[in-house]
Amino acid sequence: MVAVPARTDVVVIGAGQAGLSVAYYLQRLGVRSGVDQVVVDRGPGPGGAWQQRWAALRLGSAHRVHDLPGMRRAGITFETADRSRPARDVVGEYYGHYERFYGLDVRRPVTVAAVFDRGAELVVRTTVGEIVTRTVVNATGTWGAPFVPYYPGVREFSGRQVHTATYRDAADFAGLRVLVVGGGTSAIGFLLELEGVAAKTFWATRRPVDYLDQGTLDLEAAVTAVNQQDDAAKQGRALPSIVSGTGVPKTRRIAAAIERGVLSPRPMFDHLEREAVVWPDGSRERIDAIVWATGFRPDIRHLSPLRLHEKAGGVQVTSGAAERDPRIFFAGYGPTASTIGANRAGRTLARQVFAALGDTTTAPI
Ligand code: FAD
């Protein structure tokens, strides 16, 4: 039976790329895993949100998954990982190996329901008990907060609707007429998987797809998208989707699909009916199902008792800490919501958390 300590200095919520990266650097600063810091995660096993993703997703069809800090020393690297196996299995195994190699003590499955401000201390309420702590590193990602935009008629539509977060397998749509909504890599991936399985696919995007000529995307190099995130976080605005600002790398597979006519986006539809989509010109198509590849929002409902939200709709986060409560740190949030950004956040946040605990370090992390 999993348990959590009654008291610690740092609670890291989430053991995805961001949480593990912070835990790793904290450990290097001498903040002992399982004693001075505790990592909790609601997932059944290692892998962060990757373990929840659909079976057909491969490392090669995602953007680029960067190694966790120190991963090579642990004898593994995503660069040479098997790309023919589901990404969820590969990432889960690698993260699991990493946790064991560095002795990162992740308590799972433990869900954080709420975090409370009790004056000098914070209280983290979990499914297996409360933890009194001095600081919290929130690294909960976005997977638990899927975003579906509102369109007229959506409630009347009688067919099946799934979001990226609940999509499992193209076979679930065999013989159906499927509308895919969204202009990112996930939408394109679904259209390719559904080819030859669904009876017909339709694709609606809010704006034309911005294809990049190169076949890979380094999210860190997508400076404009990262800066947009940073500005929004600093101003306490709701965060835009980082991937929507980066463009989509035109891989050989995507280029070939464009040639075949599989990837023909239409402007956003006007409304939905019981069994149809109605386009802006009034024409309609019968559809049986909709796949909403429309992104995610930060999953931070458990922080609501702290009242960190600004009127502008987001949490004001400057240099990784909440303006309204500098004991709350955010990893993998806004400008660091990518695997390389999460790594970078790990290093800088660990130093900040360490400083907040009242210690100083010269340790070369
Ligand atoms: P996550 O991996 O989501 O980890 C968060 C963890 O927090 C989870 O394990 C979850 O169980 C836990 N958690 C959440 N809420 C709670 C709670 N209340 N209590 C306890 N635990 C909780 N980025 C890239 O850089 N390259 C890519 O190729 C790439 N591909 C992507 C493909 C898809 C389909 C999607 C949706 C995103 C992709 N991203 C990619 C973005 C990617 O999600 C991030 O880069 C990164 O993996 C997120 O790491 P994270 O640690 O912030 O979040």
Image (tube, grey):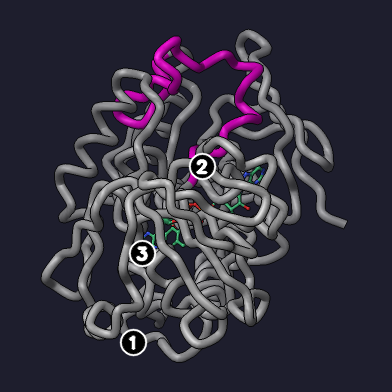
Q: Amino acid at mark 1?
A: Thr
Determine the CA span between mark 3 and mark 1. Answer: 22 Å
Quick one: label 3 or label 1, which is nearer the N terminus? 1
Q: Is mark 3 within 8 Å of ligand 1?
A: yes
Q: Amino acid at mark 3?
A: Thr
* Mark 3 vs mark 1: in front: 3
Quick one: label 3 or label 2, which is nearer the N terminus? 3
Q: Are marks 1 and 2 in contact (CB under 8 Å)?
A: no
* Mark 3 vs mark 2: in front: 2
**Residue on which the image places disc 2:** 271
Q: Residue visible at 55% across and 74% down?
A: 88
Q: Which residues are magenta?
A: 296-323
Give whichever of 176, 122 is nearer the camera. 176
Q: Position of residue 341 (x, y in %)?
A: 31, 50
351 over 143 or under it: above or below = above
Determine the CA span between mark 3 and mark 2. Answer: 24 Å
Q: Position of residue 39 (x, y in %)?
A: 61, 48
Say what secondary structure mark 3 lies in: helix
* Residue situated furthest right in the rendering: 1
**Residue on which the image places disc 1:** 80
326 over 219 or under it: above or below = above
Give whichever of 170, 144 is nearer the camera. 170
The overriding secondary structure of the stretch rendered in magenta is loop
* Mark 1 vs mark 2: in front: 2
**Residue on which the image places disc 3:** 185
Q: Can the viewer see residue 29 in this picture?
A: no
